[in-house]
Image: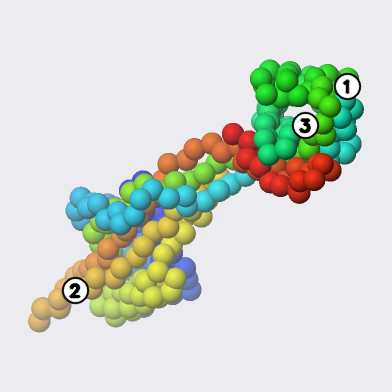
Amino acid sequence: MTLARVYQLLQAALQGALAGYVPQSGGQVVMGIGWPAEDALMEGGVHSGNVYISLFDRSPARNTTRWLPQISTMNITAAGVTAAVSAPQIAANGTATVTLGGTLLANDAVAVALRRGSTTAGASARAGGADTLDTFATALADAINADATLAAWVNASASGAVVTLQNLLNVFLGLGTGVGNLGTLGIEYHRFMRQGQVTVWAKRHDDRDAVGDMLIDAMAQIEAQPGFIEDTLSSSASYGEYLRVILSGDEWDDGEIQRSLYKRHIFVELEHPQVVQIDAWPVLATIPQITATVGYPAAQIEVA
């Protein structure tokens, strides 16, 4: 999570708390990141009745990581291709088929697994943007024949969108298949704490006090429940990044002389993650119900 995103999230969370508030001075509430421009604080700005709120960073961050890198989210694209086996096993010296269907998408993947006794082996193929179901079936057959273990058990051939597996052994083989597409894992590897400041600038002290109170209430509610702001501002899917908000306090002073500009400073601690995104291929993780009828039960296997 970048520094800019930290304050964008805080700004989005606080703006909702001010919805509908009309300053007593007759202007409007304006919130921004960074120190306000000079003209915003002079004529045409605060002095014309607007209330300005500035969000800015006060100091370098410190590392507050308290755990090992961990998966924060998993976003998986649904596969368009389908794969169906003609039977959950291949008879001794017999044949079985894997039929591809559906709408083939780029990065769709199909895995085929075979089981002989307690030994399992598998192979997979991934579709490119120019592949069709027919060319993809050929690629899958080639991947099966290229695996040394599978090539000793079966011979694979493709015709159209159908892959035929010829059992080369005089024993039954369990057969299973699975499909998937490219996904992403979000892995959090660091957390950082930084000091933030929210300053309210107003022509009238009652506007400053009212707006400041609403901001403090909003941050206190975030801190209490749920304690975090989820990053939902990204144009892509969220990767499980959460900004922790801790209200530290506020300060202001009113002298005996009438001020021309009233300020209130609110201090907040902001803890945010650093997340790296990596590719994930769920089709390679598990193929369910590899079944055969030679005295051993259905099982789940992993294909690496």
Q: Residue at x 30, y 54 (%)?
A: 65
Residue 223 vs residue 34, the one in the foreground: 223
Q: Is residue 123 above or below residue 212?
A: above
Q: Which kind of residue does numbered mark 1 sit on?
A: Gly
Which image quadrant is residue 291 in?
top right
Please give the label number shown on residue 160.
Answer: 1
Q: Residue at x 63, y 40 (%)?
A: 302
The answer, for residue 130, to whether it is visible in the render is no
Front label number (3 vs 1): 1
For marks 1 and 2, the one nearer the N-term is 1
How crowded pointer 3 is (Cα within 10 Å; few <14, some 14-19, many 20+) is rated as many
Secondary structure found at label 3 = loop
Q: Which kind of residue does numbered mark 3 sit on?
A: Leu
Tell whether 97 sits left or right of 268.
right
Q: Position of residue 77 (x, y in %)?
A: 65, 42
Q: Which kind of residue does numbered mark 2 sit on?
A: Glu
Residue at numbered disc 3: 104
Q: Residue at x 88, y 21 (%)?
A: 160
Q: Is residue 220 above or below residue 297?
A: below
Which image quadrant is residue 166 in?
top right
Could you tell me how far apart the alpha carbons at marks 3 and 1 are, in whole angstroms? 14 Å
For marks 3 and 2, the one nearer the N-term is 3
Front label number (1 vs 2): 1
